[in-house]
Image: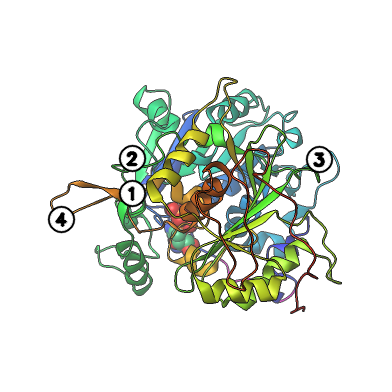
Amino acid sequence: MRLSDLDDREELGGGGPPRVVYEPRGAHRALMLCRDTEVAAVGRAGSGKTLAACWKLHLTAMKVPGLRALMLRATHVSLTATTLVTFQRQVVAASLTDGTVRWYGGSEKDPPAFRYANGSEILVAGGDRPEKFLSAELDRIFVDEAVEITLDLFETLISRLRGQAATYQQIVLATNPSHPQHWIKQRADDGNLTMLTSTHRDNPAYVNLDGTYTDAGHAYMEKLDALTGVRRQRLRDGRWTAAEGVIYEEWDPAVHMVDRFEPPAEWPRIWGVDFGYTNPFTVQWWAVDPDGRLWLYRELYWTRRTVDQHARDILRQVTDGGGKWIEPKPTAVVCDHDAEGRAVLERELGLTTVPARKQVGEGIQAVQARMRQAGDGRPRLFLMRDTLVERDPQLVEARKPLCLADEIPGYVWDKDRDGKVKEQPSKEDDHGCDTMRYVIAHVDLVAKTKVSSPAGRAAGRSGSAAGRYGRPLGGVTAGRSRR
Ligand SMILES: Nc1ncnc2c1ncn2[C@@H]1O[C@H](COP(=O)(O)OP(=O)(O)OP(=O)(O)O)[C@@H](O)[C@H]1O
Ligand SMILES: [Mg+2]
């Protein structure tokens, strides 16, 4: 991996970035001074947790020669897209320029790392590539967005805290709050982990010393104020809370989320599509294994693009530059009921589509049934990690869900004005959940009516198990619009 993959700004090579003065306040000051083995910086979105933990790591590496440290997020991709960028731009930029720190891009067996002139080293790895750090003997570990890692991985990491440098050993977690039963919260409640809770007052970029917001703070709070439901309670208010009236109570990331792998070519594929412009346009690529389990392996979740633009992005994923398919064609493209959207998609993809079965109650029950663990202890639905084709920067900025997995914990039953629960889901942040429901209804609910495409091509299908997946769509050359 090259650092320029993270940051192509010219000044890194030349004129030099501005020197940054870091001022730790409140909970972050406490974090700097804390020597406990397990400590978590927890708090509202944007309160400065990541930056504080990054600075602690860097300052320690500068001060303690020969320090061996690890910076980690649940997946390598998420780490490089977020935490590593903060570390590089806002913490070590000047040291990279003056040569005190060098970037090592990694090898077959060694993870990439920041190497310090005094012999210290900060390894950089994703929890999905444990072989890269399992043999390391570490003095310090920093896990960003730690609610995303399992207790198992956390315990493995603790077992690696065996470094020899002249300092105390510590694992620092940084995270927004999650549900109250989360292992991080439980560990803190049991007294095994020190939790330091930050607020926006701890971030000088957003709040002045007199408690008034800076301009950037005003703008950031506006975004948090626009959030609803459980995301608002966790990100804006910093509460460990579960959504009320959660629809998929069976959902457990530790069970349903798995590391990415390439589904074997013989597994049939089914695509789900939910149209949107202001709201995200969602495409989900599912593969069906020989036991009928469904695996989400790719996801498009993107706002403010037209359907024909999306169609080009979709084709880019499944065909080579010449329009040849590089993965199996789907046996069905299950779409939300938007006649115009479907017509454009069919024309641009060269694939027929089928309208989704939209019976909400039955669809939700079908999803719930798949999420439940079957006799073999496994559910019948899995989401791979890092399925996103691209992170939508507008959604990142608005702190909205970026993908299906982000939506599920906040997908709740709607309530009427008196607070009585209705038998329909709330329409907030439901785009990925709708798409998943369409796909599962298509596979699991027995067809009651024959369905047809807007172009008038019959796409009828059998409701029997044998005919569930059908043959890959074909006969039409993929894609009329190429780059
Ligand atoms: N002490 C500080 N001085 C100057 N800027 C800061 C400070 N702390 C945080 N910031 C800035 O505030 C923004 C948010 O900080 P950071 O990303 O560390 O927050 P966070 O709590 O990790 O957010 P999230 O909940 O989104 O992970 C960043 O742009 C960061 O540079
Ligand atoms: Mg952060």
- Disc 2 under 8 Å from ligand 1? The reply is no
Of labels 4 and 2, earlier in sequence is: 2
- Number of numbered callouts drawn: 4
Residue shown at 62% from the left, 47% from the top:
462
How many residues crowd around disc 1 within 10 Å: few (fewer than 14), some, or many (20 or more)? many
Mark closer to the observer (4, 3): 4
In this rendering, is residue 370 above or below 122? above
Magenta region, mostly helix, strand or loop?
loop
Whether label 1 lies within 8 Å of ligand 1 gets the answer no
Q: Identify the residue under disc 4.
A: 417
Label 1 to label 4: alpha-carbon separation: 18 Å
Mark-to-mark CA distance, 2 and 1? 7 Å
**Quarter of the figure that contains the N terminus:** bottom right
Name the mark on residue 404. none
Which span of residues is magenta-colored? Answer: 14-19
Give the SS element for disc 1: helix
Mark 4 vs ligand 1: CB below 8 Å: no
Whichever of labels 3 and 1 marks the residue nearer the N terminus, that label is 3
| Label 4 vs 3, first from the N-terminus | 3
- The label shown at residue 110 is 3
Q: Quadrant of residue 428?
A: bottom left
Q: Position of residue 321 (x, y in %)?
A: 84, 71
Residue 312 location (% of width, % of height): 69, 73
Residue at coordinates 38% horizontally, 62% vertically from top-left? Answer: 204
Disc 4 residue type?
A: Arg
